[in-house]
Amino acid sequence: MPNICISCGASITIHNPASVSIACEYCDCVMMWDEQSLKDSGTQSRLPEGYSRLYRGASGSIDNRRFQVLGRVRYQFNRGFWDEWYIIFADGEGAWITENDYQFSIQRKIDAPLFQRRPKYKMGESITVASQDFQIQELGYARCMGIEGELPKEIDPNENYVYIDATSYDGKSCLGLELREPPAIYVGTWLKGTQIQLDDETLDW
């Protein structure tokens, strides 16, 4: 039996059983998926297209590993906005590609029980997560501008939270912290544009 949008009645296809937040591509209604049914979150999400190479439904490879883009969330901060693209690899593993001013990183959510949240953070200071040291490059408040497609976590458009972006001292790894309760922790690596190859892309990047 197909899933039906609660708002407009359009057919909704769930591509990933781990998806939690679903945005209808026809009416922008945001719904929550509990593996049995769709439930209305009471919010709507309408995102501009932007100027990214990536888009919902895009397929390609990262370092010869096949992936497909399932969804996107956009966050606003004091200097503009950034996009987070949720992708799923051919083997079923999920990951996030963060894009900010044409710079890319790929991150995965981790459980770090030894991470100790502090009452205050400062730019340039060190922070240790999963036995790795990072230097804080940016911190501030982020506001969700909207979502599209499927995402593996519950996201409410217009929600706000404190975020931290940090880079390892060798410049190879990156850290993203969402200071919620409990904090959401993402660790990954920086990507060069040439590492991302899209199937329908004809331009040289």
Image: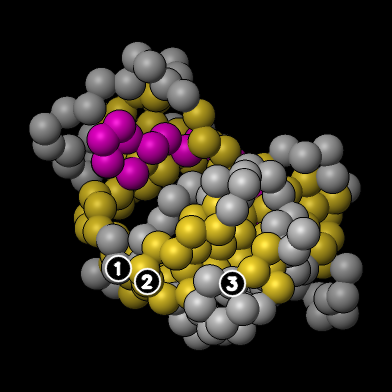
- Which mark, residue 158? 1
Image position, residue 37 (x, y; %): 59, 53
Is residue 151 among the parts visible in the rendering? no
- Residue 34 shown left or right of residue 160 in the figure: right
Asked if the residues shown at circle 2 and circle 1 are in contact, with their CB atoms under 8 angstroms apart, the answer is yes
Q: Is residue 139 above or below residue 187?
A: below
Tag 2: amino acid: Thr
- Which mark, residue 201? none
- Which mark, residue 5? 3
Q: Which residue is mark 2?
A: 43
Classified by dominant secondary structure, the portion drawn in magenta counts as: strand
SS class, disc 3: loop
Residue 179's image quarter?
A: top left
First in residue order: circle 2 vs circle 3: 3
Q: Which residues are magenta?
A: 178-192
Image position, residue 126 (x, y; %): 28, 30
